[in-house]
Image (tube, rainbow, N blue to C red):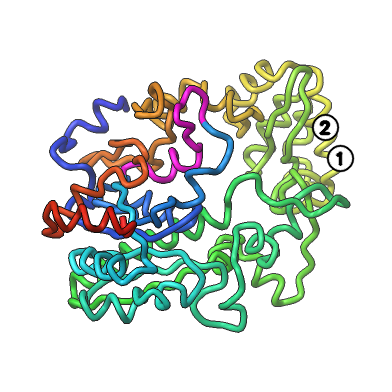
Amino acid sequence: MTPDEFYAEARRDLPGPLAGVRVVEATTTWAGPMCGCLLADFGADVVKVEMPGGEMARRAPPMLPGTDPPLSFMHATVNRNKRSLTLDLRRSEGRDLFLRLAERADVVVENFRPGVMAGYGLGYADVRRVRPDVVYVSISGFGQFGPDRDRAGYDPLAQAASGFLSLNGDPGGAPVKAPTFLADDLGGVHGALAALAALHHRGRTGEGQHVDVSLLDAMLFQSTGYPTLGALGVPLARLGNEFRIAAPARVYRCRDGELMAGVILDAHWRKLAALIGRPALADDPRYATTAARIERRAEVDALLAEWLAARTRDEALAALVGAGLPAAPVRSYAEAAADPHVRAREMLQDTPHAAGAKLPIVGPAAKLSRTPTRVRTPAPALGEHNEAILRELGLGDAEIAALRASGVV
C-alpha cells in the first residue's frame, strides 16, 4: 500500500479526529505535556497554561542547533500543536481566568503534586463547579491516594519503585534506568487514553469525572505481567539483551556492527538451522522447541553468534530478512533519523520555527486514514497566544493591558 492509497479518503478540512475538543493544560516537564501533546496531535485545541516565567521544559538542554533564541529539544517536541497562555495561578486574577477557560473546556490536564492545584483553587472540585461535566486528568508520581501520595514523583523514581530498574542492565551489573523518559511517557499516554475513555462516557451519560494517573501505576501496568510473578514469588533474573521467553535471541556482534536477532517461533528455528548450515538441528528434539532452546540457551546463542561474527551487519541482515527471520541493526538515533523507512512513515516532520530554520520534529505515531494527524504548528513561544485567548474569553484592550501591567500574564 502506498501513502496515497492509505489516505485516499482523508479529510483535509480537520486538524484530526478530536477537532472541536477543547483542552486546558497546566503542566510541566514531560508526563502532563505528553498527555496534552497526544490530544493536540489528534486535533484538539490545547491551551497550555504556564506561569509567566515559563515551565522548565523550555530551559532543558540540549538546545536545538541553529535556533536563536535557543530552543529546548523537550519544548520543541512535546509542546507542538498547542497554544500558549501565561497566567500567574497564585493570583486571584489568574485563578479566575483559568476557571473561565475551564468553563469552556472539555478536558483539564495537570501534573502537579496532589493538592497543589486545589491550593490554587483550581482542583477538580473547583473546576467542577464551573464545568460540571469536565474530564479532569491528574498525572502525578504516586497518585491522588495511597500512603505515598504526597511524595515528590519523577520519572526515574517510578522506574526504580516499580521494579523496572531491578531487571534493566547486564546480568551481574548495576540497575540501569531507561535512557528515555519512560515513566513520564507512559503516564502521558495513559492520561490521554483515559481522557478519551472519559469523554466517551460523558457522551453517553453526560457525566464528567476525575482521572487519576500515577507514573508508578503506569510503569507497573506496562511491566509485561512481572508484578504478578513477583507477587507469587517467581524469581526474575536480569537477562540484559537476552529474552526470557525465547532463545537464541539477543544483540550479536557482526564484523562491523551489532544486530538484534533471534528465534521467537519454532518455525524460525527451522529456518535458522538451515541458514547457518546446521539443518540436522531443525527437528532435533534437543532444540526444536522454545523450552528446549531456553534450556540450552548458551549453546544456541553460540551457534548464531559464530555465524554472525563472520559476516558484515548488512550481509547478515539481508540473509536473515531474506529467510523470513526477525532481525534489526542496532542503530544510533542519528542513524534511525536518516532511515528512509522512518522518513516514509513521516516520523520526522520538517517544521518551521520562529527560533530558526525548519526543524525535524518527531511526528505522531498513529496513522488515521480518514482524519490524518501531523505536526501542524511548532511549539509556541511563551505567551504567544495570550491576546488571542484572552479575547476569546471576552476581555477588551483595557483589561488585557491591566493584566499585563500587574504581571498576571
Q: Secondary structure at mark 1?
A: helix
Q: Which residue is mark 1?
A: 299
Residue 195 on image: x %, y %: 33, 64
Mark 1 closeness class: few <14, some 14–19, many ≥20 residues within 10 Å? some
Residue 259 on image: x %, y %: 69, 29
Q: Is residue 15 above or below residue 97?
A: above
Secondary structure predominantly adopted by residues drawn in magenta: loop
Q: Is residue 355 above or below residue 132?
A: above
Q: Which residue is mark 2?
A: 303
Q: Quadrant of the N terminus?
A: top left
Residue in view at x 42 percent, y 59 percent? 27
* Residue 244 left/right relative to 358: right
Amino acid of disc 2: Leu
* Residue 272 left/right relative to 326: right
Q: Is disc 1 in contact with disc 2, using a CB cutoff of under 8 Å?
A: yes
Region in magenta = 64-81
Q: Is residue 76 magenta?
A: yes
Residue in view at x 60 percent, y 46 percent? 180
